[in-house]
Image (cartoon, grey):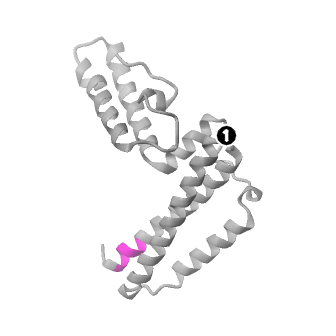
């Protein structure tokens, strides 16, 4: 039976990097799920059953973390002993705060009806582009060992990710979902 390893990347036998082949990750996840599923150990000892349940839970957590870019970024930073939950406003910079204010204002100024859908789509595209650029830069900083700069970008990615969800929520609201 598979052992629990402390590194999610090693668990799936993939390179420790922000850039992850999601199809390969999903394939390895399915393989490990088949190999370690608790039902395979139904006739085993209580210790084997417990280990299978723990491993299955760990496998799910690892997969969920590595398949989502923001969670993957936080995890990678944690592997380098950076606490992403601790945010010093000085780390963020005035340019980010100004950008946040401008994007939030653009979202808040839109009408609450369907007439805003085109502008929402445009804002969504703009935010997605910004997020993709930040993710590319994050990967580069991480690859170059510039972890403090990567942490700053992580917080920017968090903001943009949250804003994207708010935009999508606004779209759903306007469409009556």
Q: Is residue 171 found inside the magenta-colored segment of the image?
A: yes
The residue sitting at the right extreme is: 90
Where residue 62 sits: x, y (%)? 44, 35
Q: Is residue 55 magenta?
A: no
Rendered view: 54 above or below 173 = above
Q: Residues within 10 Å of mark 1 (few under 14, many from 20)?
A: few
Read off the residue under disc 1. 145
Residue 86 location (% of width, % of height): 68, 48
> Which portion, as a residue range, is magenta?
169-174
Q: Quadrant of the N terminus?
A: top left
Q: Secondary structure under badge 1? A: loop
| Residue drawn at x 43%, y 85% as measured from the top left | 112
| Residue found at x 55% / y 60% | 133
The image shows residue 63, relative to residue 46, as above or below, that is: below
Q: Quadrant of the C terminus?
A: bottom left
Q: Main secondary structure of the magenta part?
A: helix
**Quarter of the view holding residue 63:** top left
């Amino acid at each position: 039976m598979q052992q629990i390893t402390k590194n999610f990347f090693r668990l799936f036998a993939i390179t420790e990097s922000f850039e992850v082949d999601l199809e390969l990750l999903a394939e390895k996840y399915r393989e490990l799920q088949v190999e370690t599923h608790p039902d395979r150990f139904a006739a085993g000892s209580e210790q084997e059953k417990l280990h299978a349940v723990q491993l299955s839970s760990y496998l799910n957590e690892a997969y969920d973390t590595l398949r989502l870019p923001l969670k993957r970024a936080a995890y990678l930073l944690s592997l380098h002993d950076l606490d992403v939950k601790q945010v010093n406003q000085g780390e963020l910079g005035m340019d980010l705060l100004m950008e946040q204010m401008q994007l939030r204002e653009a979202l808040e100024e839109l009408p609450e009806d369907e007439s805003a859908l085109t502008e929402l789509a445009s804002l969504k595209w703009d935010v997605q582009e910004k997020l993709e650029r930040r993710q590319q830069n994050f990967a580069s900083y991480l690859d170059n060992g510039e972890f403090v700069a990567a942490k700053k970008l992580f917080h920017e990615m968090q903001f943009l990710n949250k804003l994207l969800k708010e935009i999508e929520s606004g779209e759903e609201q306007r469409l009556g979902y």
